[in-house]
Image (cartoon, rainbow, N blue to C red):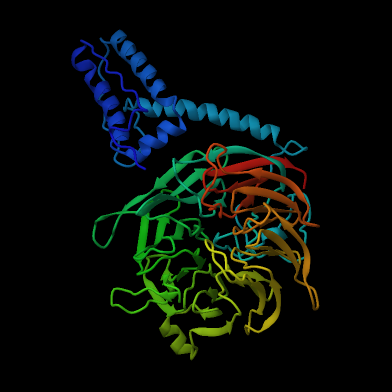
Amino acid sequence: MFCTLSDATCLGVVPVFVNAGAALLPAILAGVASVAALIFNPRALVRLCKAKPHIPLLIVMVAVGGYFAVTWVLGQPDQAAQSPAAGRRAPASENDNDWAQVALEILRQEERAKVREFLRAAAKPDGKTPPTDTVTNNGPNASQDPTEPPATPDPPDETPRAAIFRGDASRCGYLGGGSPLELTQLWPFAEPDTMYLSSPIVVGDAVYGASCLLDPPTNYGAIFCLDADTGEERWYTDVVDDPATGEEIEFKGFFSSPAISADGKYLVIGQGLHSESNCQLVCLEADTGKLKWLVQTPLHIEGSPAIEGDVVIAGVGAIEVGDDHKPAGDPAGAGHPGYVLAVRLSDGKELWKHQVNDPESSPVVDRGIAYIGSGINGSKVVALRIETDEELKQKGLERVAWEVDTPYPATGTVTLAGDLVLIGCGKGDYVFAAPDPAGVVLALDRATGEIRWQQHLDDAVLGPIAAAGGKAICPVRNGEVIALDLGAAEGDRVLWRQKISEDTPVLAGPAFTGDYVYAVSQDGYLAVLDAADGSVLQRLYINAEDKPGEMGLSVSSPIVSGGRVYVGSETGGLQCLVGKVLK
């Protein structure tokens, strides 16, 4: 999958022979260094050539023009050339004749101009482009438009909150601004042969995401930050130095989604796919992508971590093997069932861990309690106090506030809706359907864990449930998106149900703005639904047209922010979609 020197036919290097002596030597060395930096970074080389095939030609043209310019001013004093800074794609200094960077900057300026023109065309009728809001804890209860009152009378919570998977505890994937229709692509961020299973998060004018590149028998991953307006890369981290050993670590593929601390300083994400062991919980500086800390685990972290204050909570999932789905052995030879891990955000110190069988569910933390589901060999929902062991001992409390058995494995993401804990359960997983499918949505009392109600469905609910305005929008493995009435007294709570792509599973969490629902099917179709009755308003393909998603891994959950939709796909990259903002 990676380009070698013999594969690098996409880059044309034209030697230039001059007789200008030492005056040309710094420029030649800088140009050679730029090209060499690409050649000896095969992944960057392939990415550059495939994403922008005209850049090599521009490099040559700029180099030739530079030669004639230098010849003309041969009598001028020489400028001292500096070597490009170390790093994956370090920016050139003022004295660097880095022709690749010059060409890229020209293209970026052209793209920025196009984006500004596009945004003006896509602006609201009053001429104002919907703002890109920072995350609050209000979800769809925030105003649809800054000039309109909130959709519900709930007072806003002004406490700074971390930006977690799907935005906040409502899991609505809605961060404020308008609800766009008639979507078209504004920009894509795509690397060759790379999938975007993880779901993006938007904070201010930055989009954070993670990727997965399959290269059997292993896989690779990267974490990155993009400009929300243009898709331009701000930083990209795929290799770090292990603080414990000093050895270089290449990231494994990411299924987990990033969370951003309440102060915006740190990004935290789990690492690894389901069959992998020896993966880490990763913390990077949000502004730079530099490593803050790593916490090693014997297993993997597919669920997305939650942050409250200085505490990070993550589920370390089990690896099931055989027909009986028993957990695989750890280095000591015993089966490792999995556990919930608590880490201090400020320095990565492990605070505690508590055994929970297969906690693949993405947890949520609120007011000192972490809620998480237990999957294979567990089938529970568990509420854990997040204080340290010493603090609990002083208070005379146990780690477990409550735990409740579920009829099926509880691998779905935990959602909070008022005084309810919502979670989806069911048979089957993201890859394999159960021969006898069944599923259920459970509503539990936050304080006691008592089951308030349960809605049985035809198949598993594996993705996150979006809850706001008295409705819960549920993705179902049989291909349906189902709206439930949270306020119904008894009986069937289904308000409507809609299929996105026939029977193709819906595994990603739907984004719910109060007016519209944005849902993705496993085969790569994004549908915009009317939240009132589930009718399909638009349906578009988000995988690459020339490379359809054959693995059925379009599982990234969309985010709606500032009148735009951000979503990952199997073959179409991470992309930003814009449209008409009517509500």
Q: Examine the image and state in which quarter residue 160 appears.
A: bottom right
Lateral position of residue 357 relative to residue 493, left or right: left
Q: Residue furthest left?
A: 21
Return the residue nearer the eye: 94 or 289: 289
Return the residue nearer the eye: 549 or 93: 549
Return the residue nearer the eye: 569 or 421: 569
Residue 51 lies, with reference to residue 322, above or below; the image says above
Count of numbered tags: 0
Return the residue nearer the eye: 200 or 460: 460
Q: What residue is rendered at 51% in x and 66% in y?
A: 306
Q: What residue is rendered at 62% in x and 83% in y?
A: 449
Q: Residue 323: percent from the left, percent from the top?
A: 45, 73
Q: Residue 279: percent from the left, percent from the top?
A: 37, 63
Residue 427 lies, with reference to residue 511, above or below; the image says below
Whether residue 338 appears in this view of the structure is no
Q: Examine the image and state in which quarter residue 418 appears.
A: bottom right
Lateral position of residue 528 relative to residue 327, left or right: right
Quadrant holding the N terminus: top left
Whether residue 94 appears in this view of the structure is yes
Q: What residue is rendered at 26% in x and 10% in y?
A: 74
Q: Residue furthest bottom?
A: 396
Lateral position of residue 147 relative to residue 98, left or right: right
Residue 514 lies, with reference to residue 579, above or below; the image says below
Q: Examine the image and state in which quarter residue 111 appears.
A: top right
Q: Residue 564: percent from the left, percent from the top?
A: 65, 45
Q: Residue 263: percent from the left, percent from the top?
A: 51, 58
